[in-house]
Image (cartoon, rainbow, N blue to C red):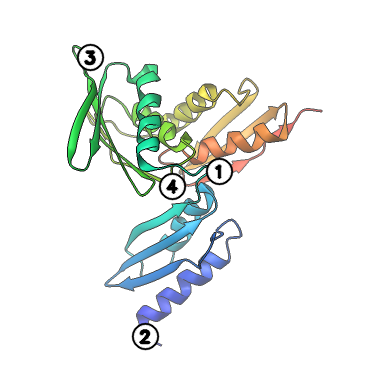
Amino acid sequence: MSQEQDIVAAVRAALHSEPRVRATKEPLQLAFANGDLTLEGEVDHIAGKKLALEAAARVPGVRFIVDRLRVYPAAAMGDDEIRDKVRDALLEEVTLADCTIRIWDKGQCEVVREPAGATGIVDIGVADGVVTLDGDVAGPGRKRMAGVLAWWVPGSRDVVNGIGVTPPEQDSEAAVTDAVLQVLERDPFVNSESIRVRTRRAVVTLDGTVPREAERKLAEDDVWYVFGVDNVINNLSVRS
């Protein structure tokens, strides 16, 4: 067996060792060449996607990952419907109120909002259920919120968040924690009053209580959607 085959076998073993990495249809496809690993296929949850990428990145010899993993959508939607829902969500988000919002479709740009004195810009594109966000905003919190809003659209299969931050700002665990808290507060289906959040090395821990089991799961899902979160430890309990 060649070295490349050994690395692919090691990656496959790492994926099999993580029970939350579950392919929805066909097994995940792996290809490796010159230090670059390509992961392709569909998993049933955002957690599975992120954990698959983390597991593969830990395998010695893997220097770069081409991420072609998709998440099974919660609802069947066409690209136009996804694009419209992402657009509407960004337009309604108060932290993005001073940002220009543009839609890209088939190489054509449509400006849907351009406020006077705009401090940022967000470009939206959708292809095969994959939402691409580009542009530039003031602060990583806005970048993260835009990404979560795109993930909340039930037809989204992936979100590629390429939004830049100007002026450049050093990211931190505190910034991730603040973003998670903000997202939990925004979710109308989660009672975040008794939820505590800690972040360490891209791992977010949730402590506290929620009224229902469904909210326990929804809170965890929200954290997985946040850009920069690699793992979630859900210690939330359901109040009796």
Q: Which mark is residue 126?
A: none
Q: Amino acid at mark 2?
A: Ser
Q: Amino acid at mark 3?
A: Pro
Instruction: Name which residue lies at 32% across and 16% down.
Output: 97
Relative height, residue 14 to residue 145 (above, below): below
Place of residue 123 in the rendered image (x, y in percent of width and height, measured from the top left) = 25, 33
Which residue is identified by label 1?
Answer: 232
- Specify whether 213 is left or right of 65: right
Place of residue 141 in the rendered image (x, y in percent of width and height, measured from the top left) = 37, 27
Residue 204 visible in image: yes
The image quadrant where one finds the N terminus is: bottom left
Q: Which mark is residue 157?
A: 4
**Which of label 2 and label 4 is nearer to you?**
4
Q: Secondary structure at mark 4?
A: loop
Q: Secondary structure at mark 3?
A: loop
Q: Do residues under tags 4 and 3 come within 8 Å of each other at their CB atoms?
A: no
Q: Residue furthest right?
A: 240
Which residue is identified by label 3?
Answer: 115
